[in-house]
Structures are given as C-alpha cells and as structure tokens.
Amino acid sequence: MGSPPPNIARVYDYLLGGKDNYEADRTLGERIAIALPQVHLGVQQQRAVLRRVVDHLVREAGLRQLIDIGSGLPTAENVHQVAQRIAPDTQVVYVDNDPSVLAHARALLADDKRTVVTDGDLRHPAELLADPALRAHIDFDRPVGLLLCGILHYVLDDEDPYGIVRALVEALPSGSYVFVHHLTTAGPEVDADTAEAEAALRQGVGRGQFRTHEQVAAFLDSLDLLEPGVVTVPEWRPDADTPSPDDHPVLRLAAVGVGRKR
C-alpha cells in the first residue's frame, strides 16, 4: 500500500519538524520550501505567536477555557501544553474536521481529562458550538478564549467568513477573547521579494483566500483590540529573539490580532 495523498495538516507538521507525516506530505513540503525557502520560518513564527497569545490569555487575562478551531495535528508546544503549564486546570477543546487529525489527536490525548478533541467544521458554527463534547467541557457562563489560527484563510468569501466569526463571537460570554491569524496579500505596491514570497505561498496553500490587512482586522471589529492591534506575526508582543519582518519577507504575509468582548 502506497503513501496516502498529501494532507495540509501533515505538511504543516513536517514543516515544523514533526514526525507525523508521510512521503507525499514531505514531498509537497519540500516543493513549497523550494519555491519559498523561508516557509519553515513562517510556520515556526505562526507557532510562536500562538504560544505568546495563549500565554497572555491564561497568565494575564486569567482565562481557564480555550477553544482551538482548525487545530491541526498536536505537536510540540501545543495549546494545551502551553496553557496547562501555566494553569493546570485550564480546559482545552480542539476542533477539527480532518479524520487523520482527529484520530491522531484522540489517541495522543486519551488520558488527558482536561483536553478533548471534537469533530467540527468552522463553516457550520451553530453545529460546532452545539457539539455535546464541547458543551460538556466548556462553560459558556464564563469567559472563553477562541483561537482561529491559520484557519480563516481557508474559508472563501462566498462561504461568509465574516458571518461565521460573528456567529461564534455572539455565542461567547462577556470577557471572552478572540485570536485571529490570517494570511495576507501585500497588494500591488510591494517590493519584489515580498511579491515572490506571496506567489510561492499561494501555490503551497492551494484552496484559500489571502485578504488585505484591513480585511483581516474586520474580523475583530466588534471587539476591543489588545495592543498592538492587528499587526504582522513578529510584531505581536515579540520575544527578544523574534525575527524581524524587515529581514524576512515571508513574515510580512500574515496578520494577527486579539480582541476582547465587552
């Protein structure tokens, strides 16, 4: 039996240096890396900003409930590991609709009573929020952290991405937070290096929709934005060793922001 066809979650795992991938995933990952040599840095920094956001939500904002939609394969420094290292009582729900992700994550987390994995599709928010496993794990009378990391750019305009986010936000109690990470288009007035990086990234992503910085910010327009607002990945509360987008064009191609619901 040959290797299964490439899967975006496993390709991402490969680019992060993980081991939960097959030959077809590695082949596609290398093809992306040839077109965009900085892609490894891009996925590493996406992971790094997710860690910084989770750290803030648990340590500073005091949240003890997190929902990660489109979570992908569990890997090093995943949401539950970061959160529960700070506050062991933090409840985490991973939501995905990829069968390989669900099977692997459930096996890995079988003995973790504070972390569950559930089958859900972001494009159907009412069904996702009504899931019994999610409802059993998350108390919607208390603030929740909603993580939409690297998932909204897979929702096309004709699938009503803004309506989907509105429905999710409306279901959250006051004091909740929403994190968005989204691939962006640099537009026509951009240097050649950034334009080349965007073209390569588009080829690798396949189905997806890059949006402008302003369009990404619109996902959070009903919320109170945390400083520094909607910015590139390295600009959101960087660590001392966070690389600069001025030196790495690929890091100009994603925007992130965190908003609080009043």
Image (cartoon, grey):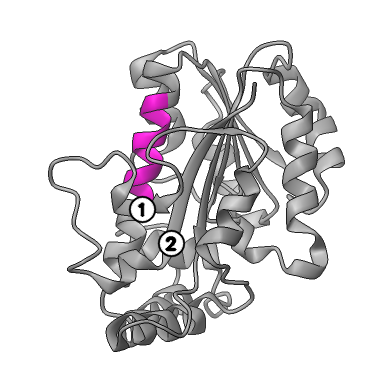
Residue 233: mark in rendering: 1
Q: What residue is rendered at 34% in x and 36% in y? A: 52
Instruction: Tell me whether circle 1 and circle 2 mark residues in contact (CB < 8 Å).
Output: yes
- The image quadrant of residue 133 is top right
Q: What residue is rendered at 62% in x and 72% in y? A: 208
| SS type, badge 2 | strand
* 213 on left or right of 222: left
> Chief secondary structure of the magenta span?
helix
Q: Position of residue 122 (x, y in %)?
A: 73, 50
* 232 on left or right of 150: left
- The image quadrant of residue 76 is top left
Tell me if residue 178 comes above or below residue 235 in the rendering. Answer: above
Amino acid type at image mark 1: Val
Q: Position of residue 56 (x, y in %)?
A: 38, 26
Q: Quadrant of the C terminus?
A: top right
Residue 175 or residue 150, whichever sits in front: 175
Magenta residues span 46-56
Q: Position of residue 244 (x, y in %)?
A: 20, 59
Amino acid type at image mark 2: Ala
Residue 192 or residue 19, whichever sits in front: 192
Residue 104 visible in the shown view: yes
Residue 172: mark in rendering: none
Q: Position of residue 145 (x, y in %)?
A: 57, 28
Residue 99 or residue 136, whichever sits in front: 136
Badge 1 crowding class, 10 Å Cα cut-off, few under 14, some 14 to 19, many 20 or more, is many
Q: Residue furthest front?
A: 189
The residue pinned by badge 2 equals 254
